[in-house]
Amino acid sequence: MANIQESSRGGFSNKLGFVLAAAGSAVGLGNIWKFPFEVSDGGGGAFVVMYLAFCFMLCFPVMMAEIALGRKTNKNAVGAFAENGHKKWAPIGILAVLSGSLILSFYNVVAGWALGYAWEMFSGNFSVGQHFGEFVGNWHINMATSTAFMFVTIFIVAKGVSGGIEKASKILMPSLLFLILALMTYSLTQEGAMEGVKFYLIPDFSEITFETAYGAMGQAFFSLSLGMGALITYGSYVGKRDNMVSATSMILLADVGIAFIAGLMMFSFIFSQGLQGQGGGAGLIFTVLPGAFESIGPILGRIIGGFFFVLLSFAALTSTVSLLEVPVSYVVDEFEVRRNRAVWIVGFVIFLFGIPSMLGNGTVDFFTNFVHYHGAEKAVNFMDFIEDLASDTFLPLGGFLVAVYTAYVWRGDKFKEEVEKGNPEFGNSLMGKYTIFALKFLAPLILGSITIVTILSKFFGIHLIG
Ligand code: TRP
């Protein structure tokens, strides 16, 4: 227990606890719900290749920077900058708190769908797959499930870092991994599965457009919980002697690995059920999987399907917990509010802000056709708008700012010094040199330009490229 931090903020009990909690934050709806539909909408293998490249080449260095900053300062996403001597940079943290809160508001709604689907599967209602639109349009059910979900999230965050977050991750993550591996194996034996695998793995580079590239970038950030201070916050609870480099590698591999397996499973099921080419969108797993579970058999299908959505809800829970932790630790540190009170207030406000996302699926027209981007064919609903704003725009922007801050304000050698506590060879290693290079040049250049072009093309219909 040597690593427990002595302050009253609490901390992870050891490195494994941190890695599991951070991997728990990373692995969530982003991997199992979002990744497959982004791949499907983004043209298959080419999207996957770009996604992987972004994860390893850009996200890895940014992740190191976030964790190092958190650990160095022992502070929340906003306070970390001030504590490090650069108060002027604290607005990056404010942006982070804002994007985290926005993401949580809609994430909680989707998590509620997963919970509702667990119930439907256990009761053998496989046909809900064809009625996804009605399911999400029924706001009574969604209100109930997402209230329940936020309630549990609040409960865990209120229990603090090692007691709640860490314990939950340790049990739930391995169970989820086991179940999707089993489902993947089953899916690959289905007739027609190989067509799906080909779509998923063989890149067709003519599919690459600028939209695919920023979609892949946004997805990489979202899935790795980057760009909004979640890892600054979790990093602030990490022991000083822990090896950050290996911790970061494990988090990255766990997240990318689970997304990859989930993709294999999904595309095998999609093609074996002949559902390809119908456009995925946010309903993809909810329309495809019930049919797959039905094919397993009436009783076994219910059990496996039910458990799948239960575990998906748990994966979502370890993510919502990290999303809520960011604004909560900010309020606790900076305004000296007691943790318990901060959790309830912040959780409640974010929940309220999620209601328009819930009502925007056909219930209330205003939220269903919420904005019409300049030059776009159709209006997008409230949830998609928040997703576009927070995950495709704010996260890469946050990543850009963190990279610039680390490389030019905090400075490469100071960053290196922090990482070297726990990994003395870092500075001279190839990985260390690459990390610094990426933070100095690659990340600012690529993330900066993607952010600008995304804003112009997505929201204003100004297409500078492709
Ligand atoms: N990464 C999580 C997922 O894949 C979602 C998430 C949790 C997140 N914390 C985050 C996304 C912080 C961005 C930033 O489901």
Image (spheres, rainbow, N blue to C red):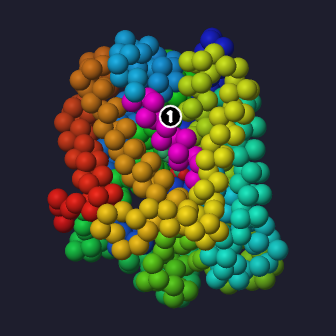
* Residue displayed at 77% across by 51% down: 148
Q: Residue furthest front?
A: 366
Name the quadrant containing residue 356: bottom right
Which residue is identified by label 1? Answer: 97
Q: Which residue is located at x 56 percent, y 25 percent?
A: 330
Asked whether residue 220 is drawn in magenta, I would say no
Residue 367 position within the rendered picture, expressed as x and y whole percent measured from the top left:
56, 62
Q: Is residue 177 left or right of residue 433?
A: right
The residue under label 1 is which amino acid type?
A: Val
Counting the numbered discs, the total is 1
Most foreground residue, 386 or 304: 386
The reply, left or right, for residue 398 in relation to residue 434 is right
Which stretch is magenta?
A: 92-106
Magenta span: helix, strand or loop, mainly? Answer: helix
Relative to 435, is 200 above or below? below
The location of residue 97, given as percent across then percent down, is 50, 34
Q: Quadrant of residue 404?
A: top left
Characterize the local packing of mark 1: few (<14), some (14-19) or many (20 or more) Cα atoms within 10 angstroms: many
Q: Residue at x 45, y 35 (%)?
A: 96
Left or right, residue 265 beside residue 161 = left
Circle 1 sits in a helix, a strand or a loop, which is it?
helix
Answer yes or no: is residue 263 visible: no
Q: Is residue 440 above or below residue 455?
A: above
Q: 310 or 417: which is nearer to us? A: 310
Q: Is residue 95 magenta?
A: yes
Picture coordinates of residue 228, whole percent (x, y): 45, 37
What residue is at 34 percent from the left and 53 percent from the top?
217
Disc 1 C-beta below 8 A from ligand 1: no
Quarter of the rendering occupied by the N terminus: top right
Residue 297: x, y in percent?
A: 75, 83
Q: Quadrant of the C terminus?
A: bottom left
In the image, 180 versus 153, the foreground residue is 153
